[in-house]
Image (cartoon, rainbow, N blue to C red):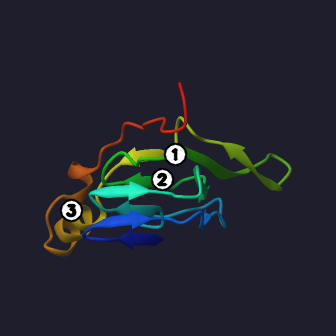
Amino acid sequence: GIVLKASGTLDLNDVLLNQGWTTAGKSFQGMYVESPNILNTGGNIDALSNDLNWLNFSTLPHAPVRALTLVRHANGTASYAAADATAPHLDTYSTLSNAAASGACWTCLVNTTPVNMFGP
C-alpha cells in the first residue's frame, strides 16, 4: 500500500499514484491520501490501483481524480480499466490503522461507498 500523509496542505505536484501491480490485493494494500487540504497543482490526480484495493482520501481533494484499476481477464492477461466511479473512497488511514492496532473493529469504520471524484 501507499500512504501519503500531511498535517497541512498535501500537493501531489502531478505525481502519478501507482500501486497497480496485482490482481490479488489484500487489506491495507490500497492507497491512502490523508490531509485536511489535498490538491494537485499539475491538474488531475491520476492513480493506478489494484483491482481489489481502493484509492482512499481523508477529505475530498481540490482536484479531479482519474482512477484506473488493474483487471484480470479470462485469458490470464491484465489491463487497466477506468474506475472513477468505483475506486475512490473517503477513508482515513490513521483512523483505520489506529483501530486495527488497538484491536478494535477497523472494518466497522470503513466507508464502503465509492465517490466519483472525476466527474458526473
Dots 3, 1 in contact, CB < 8 A: no
Q: What amino acid type is highlighted by mark number 3?
A: Thr
Instruction: State the separation of the CA atoms marked 2 and 3.
Output: 16 Å
Left/right of residue 9 with respect to residue 1 in the rendered view: left
Residue depicted at x 54% and y 62%: 25
Looking at the picture, how far across and down is residue 70, in whole percent?
Answer: 68, 54
Q: What element carries label 3?
A: helix
Q: Where is residue 41 drawn, in percent x and y?
A: 52, 58
Q: Which of 24 and 116 is in front in this view?
A: 116
Task: Give the residue drawn at x 47%, y 62%.
Answer: 30
Give the residue at x 15% y 70%.
103
For disc 2, the marked residue is 54
Label 1 sits on what residue type? Ala
Between discs 1 and 2, the one toward the N terminus:
2
User: Is residue 54 shown above or below 99?
Assistant: above
Residue corresponding to mark 1: 87
